[in-house]
Image (cartoon, helix red, strand yellow):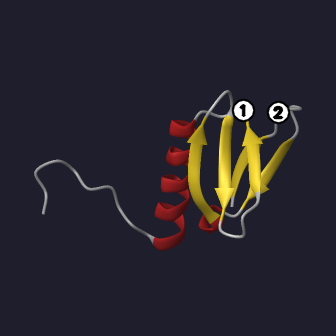
Amino acid sequence: MIRLTRLNGKEFYVNAELIKTIESAHTTVLCLNDGDKINVRETPQLVVEAVIEYRRKAYGARPVMSGEE
């Protein structure tokens, strides 16, 4: 789960595995696998970073350094 902020300022958690796409319009819109859409204050880049961090913690993946194979 990642913590995000609704447009009204309330924080909430969303299952990062359910995010299908992230759109950038006037706000950031999360499109979920079930078709729901959620507007959040965070930028698309911050959402992506939160998802990556979640997956690193959940799956134990380590960051790949440039030049590594």
Q: Which residue is mark 2?
A: 7
Q: Which mark is residue 41?
A: 1
In the image, is residue 34 above or below residue 52?
below
**Residue at x 86%, y 32% (from the top left corner):** 9
Which quarter of the rendered picture does the C terminus lie within?
Answer: bottom left
Left or right: 3, with 56 as reference point? right
Q: Is residue 25 left or right of residue 39?
A: left
User: For numbered disc 1, what is the local secondary structure?
Assistant: loop
Name the kind of residue labelled 1 in the image: Arg
Find residue 17 and report its image quarter: bottom right
Height in image: 28 above or below 60? above
Q: Residues within 10 Å of mark 2 (few under 14, many from 20)?
A: some
Q: Nearer the viewer, residue 30 or 52?
A: 30
Image quadrant containing the N terminus? bottom right
CA distance separating discs 1 and 2 = 6 Å
Badge 2 amino acid: Leu
Q: Position of residue 38 (x, y in %)?
A: 76, 49
